[in-house]
Image (tube, rainbow, N blue to C red):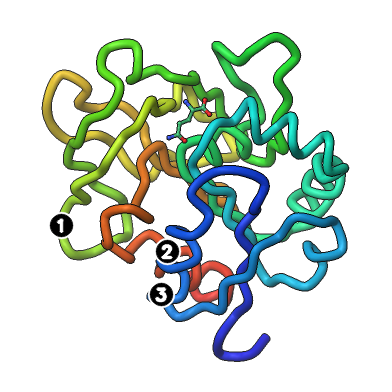
C-alpha cells in the first residue's frame, strides 16, 4: 500500500461527503463505493451515518450486502459511524422487521437508543488510545452498544451526564464503530485512528 491509502465511503445513503472530507484531512484518498467491483479497489471502507434501514434496503437492491459481508469477513478494515455502527454490528435490537446488517463486530447495538430520550445531543466521550482529551461527541438518533462480546473491545464511553458509562465506541481487529459523528465536528482524531488501522500502524 502507498503512504496514502485509498479508503472507500459506502455511498448508498448518508453523510458520505462529510466522511470523505474527514478522511482527506486524516491523510487518505477518499472514493465513493456503490458497486461490488469498487470494493476491490479500496484499502479500507467507511460506512457513514444516515439511516440503517434505508442503507440495508439499498445494499440489497444494489447487490452489495453479500459482497460487503464477504470483504469485511475477509479482513477489509472498516469504520462505521452511527447508522454505520449498526451496519457493522453482529446483532441489533429495535431494528425493523427483517433488518439485516453486514456484521463483523461481536456486539449488540440498540437502534435509536438515545433518540428515545432526545433526538440529538452532545456529550464528552473518552476513547482509549486517542490522546488530546475527550471528544465533544455529537449523537443524532444514535444507537448505543448494549453489550460487547468476547471478540470485541469497548473503546469509548460517555464520560458525564445521565448517560455516563454508555459504550459508544468499539473496536474488533480492523473494525471500528462509533455511535457519534466525528465527521461533522471537524475533529479528525477518529479518522486518523482509522487511517492508521488501515496502514497497519494501530
Ligand atoms: N445519525 C444516524 O446515523 C442515525 C441512525 C439511525 N437512527 C438508524 O437507525 O440507522
- Labelled disc at residue 133: 1
Q: Looking at this view, is 173 or 53 the one in front?
A: 53
Q: Residue at x 67, y 46 (%)?
A: 12
Residue 152's image quarter? Answer: top right
Q: Secondary structure at mark 3?
A: loop
Q: In front: mark 2 or mark 1?
A: 2
Q: Looking at this view, is 181 or 145 the one in front?
A: 181
Q: Residue at x 15, y 19 (%)?
A: 162
Q: Residue at x 79, y 44 (%)?
A: 69
Instruction: Specify whether 201 is left or right of 60.
Output: left
* Mark 2 vs 1: CB contact within 8 A: no
- Labelled disc at residue 191: 2
Instruction: Specify whether 115 is left or right of 172.
Output: left
Real-space CA distance between mark 3 and mark 1, rounded to the nearest whole angstrom:
18 Å
Q: Earlier in the sequence, mark 3 or mark 1?
A: 3
Q: Earlier in the sequence, mark 2 or mark 3?
A: 3
- Labelled disc at residue 26: 3
Real-space CA distance between mark 2 and mark 3, rounded to the nearest whole angstrom:
6 Å
Amino acid at each position: 500500500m502507498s503512504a496514502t491509502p485509498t479508503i472507500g465511503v459506502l455511498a448508498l445513503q448518508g453523510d458520505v461527503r462529510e466522511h470523505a472530507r474527514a478522511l482527506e484531512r486524516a491523510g487518505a484518498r477518499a472514493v465513493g463505493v456503490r458497486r461490488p467491483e469498487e470494493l476491490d479497489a479500496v484499502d479500507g471502507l467507511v460506512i457513514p451515518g444516515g439511516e440503517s434501514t434505508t442503507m440495508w434496503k439499498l445494499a440489497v437492491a444494489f447487490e452489495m450486502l453479500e459482497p460487503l459481508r464477504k470483504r469485511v469477513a475477509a479482513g477489509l478494515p472498516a469504520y462505521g459511524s452511527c447508522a454505520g455502527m449498526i451496519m457493522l454490528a453482529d446483532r441489533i435490537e429495535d431494528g425493523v422487521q427483517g433488518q439485516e446488517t453486514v456484521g463483523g463486530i461481536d456486539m449488540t447495538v440498540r437502534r435509536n437508543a438515545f433518540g428515545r430520550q432526545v433526538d440529538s445531543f452532545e456529550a464528552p466521550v473518552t476513547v482509549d488510545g486517542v490522546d488530546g482529551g475527550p471528544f465533544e461527541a455529537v449523537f443524532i438518533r444514535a444507537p448505543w452498544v448494549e453489550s460487547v462480546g468476547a471478540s470485541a473491545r469497548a473503546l469509548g464511553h460517555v464520560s458525564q451526564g445521565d448517560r455516563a458509562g454508555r459504550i459508544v465506541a468499539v473496536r474488533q481487529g480492523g473494525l471500528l464503530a462509533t455511535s457519534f459523528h466525528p465527521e461533522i465536528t471537524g475533529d479528525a482524531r477518529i479518522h486518523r485512528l482509522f487511517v492508521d488501522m488501515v496502514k497497519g500502524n494501530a
